Image (tube, helix red, strand yellow):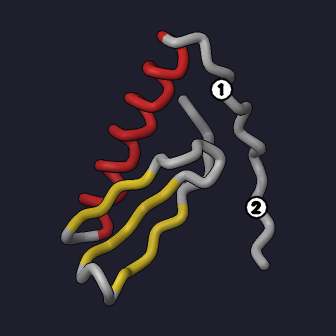
Amino acid sequence: MNKYEIILYWSSEDSCFIAEIPELKGCIAHGETDEIALKNVKDAMTLWLEVAEEFGDSIPQPKGRRLQYA
């Protein structure tokens, strides 16, 4: 099981929930509900990791802690 931090929030601009995994550049998804956004980003994470492995790209280790915010 991958233990990457997932940030989930409501976007008024997009009128949907957004879920992103900051440690995996560009790994982001959305959904009408928070549950759907979370499922979608987990699917996106699986694909992100599969593609990175296929192309021999480096895969960051999960930090296992909360990221810093500015």
Mark 2: few/some/many CA within 10 Å (<14, 14-19, 20+): few
Left or right side of 44 for 54:
right
User: What residue is pinned by disc 2?
Assistant: 67
Left or right side of 64 for 37:
left
Task: Give the spatial CA distance, label 2 vs label 1.
Answer: 17 Å
Left or right side of 42 for 33:
left
- Helix or strand or loop: what does disc 1 sit on? loop
Q: Nearer the viewer, residue 5 or 58?
A: 58
Which residue is located at x 65 percent, y 26 percent? 59
User: What residue is pinned by disc 1?
Assistant: 59
Where is 55 relative to 3, above or below? above
* Callout 1 amino acid: Ile
Q: Quadrant of residue 6?
A: bottom right
* Callout 2 amino acid: Leu
Where is 32 relative to 2, above or below? below
* Residue 45 x %, y %: 45, 37
Q: Quadrant of the N terminus?
A: top right
Q: Quadrant of residue 58?
A: top right
Which residue is located at x 36 percent, y 82 percent? 11
